[in-house]
Image: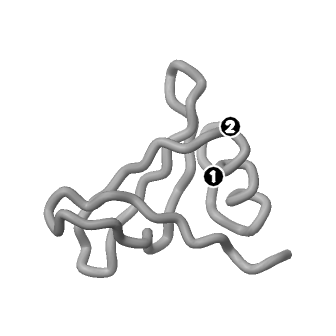
Amino acid sequence: MSKPIVIEGYCMKLKSKQPFVDPIISKNAKGGYVCKGETKDGHKMCAIMSKDKAEAAVASGVKKEGF
């Protein structure tokens, strides 16, 4: 297994891009991919991803849910 990919999302509270801590990738109702998680400070974040990026992240060791 390769090293996990660092996934970033925009934190609305901090107003900047932050890396996810323990991200979980899931599929939404329309078939798109969403990454949910928290910042190191505990603020919740969400990021919409492409299929290619989501599959690469799952292959590198990021948790998946519902697909």
User: How far apart are labels 1 and 2 at the CA level?
Assistant: 7 Å
Q: Residue at x 43, y 69 (%)?
A: 20
Q: Seen in the image, is 44 located left or right of residue 24?
A: left
Q: Seen in the image, is 34 located left or right of residue 56?
A: left
Instruction: Locate the N terminus by quadrant.
Output: bottom right
- Quadrant in which residue 61 is drawn: bottom right
- Amino acid residing under circle 2: Phe
Graded by Cα atoms within 10 Å as few (under 14), some (14 to 19) or many (20 or more), the crowding at tag 1 reads some
Q: Report the residue that reaches farthest toward the top.
A: 30
- Quadrant in which residue 2 is drawn: bottom right
Q: Report the residue that reaches farthest toward the front.
A: 16
Q: For numbered disc 2, what is the local secondary structure?
A: loop
Question: Does the residue at mark 1 contact the one at mark 2 (Cβ under 8 Å)?
Answer: yes
Q: Residue at x 73, y 49 (%)?
A: 55
State the image coordinates of residue 32 (x, y, percent, origin top left). 56, 30
- The colour scheme used to paint the residues is one colour
Residue 64's disc is 1
Q: Seen in the image, is 59 located left or right of residue 22?
A: right
Find disc 2 in the rendering and name its residue.
67
State the image coordinates of residue 11 (x, y, percent, origin top left). 26, 61
Q: For numbered disc 1, what is the local secondary structure?
A: strand
State the image coordinates of residue 35 (x, y, percent, origin top left). 49, 51
Instruction: Locate the C terminus by quadrant.
Output: top right
Q: Residue at x 47, y 42 (%)?
A: 48
Graded by Cα atoms within 10 Å as few (under 14), some (14 to 19) or many (20 or more), the crowding at tag 2 reads few
- Amino acid residing under circle 1: Lys
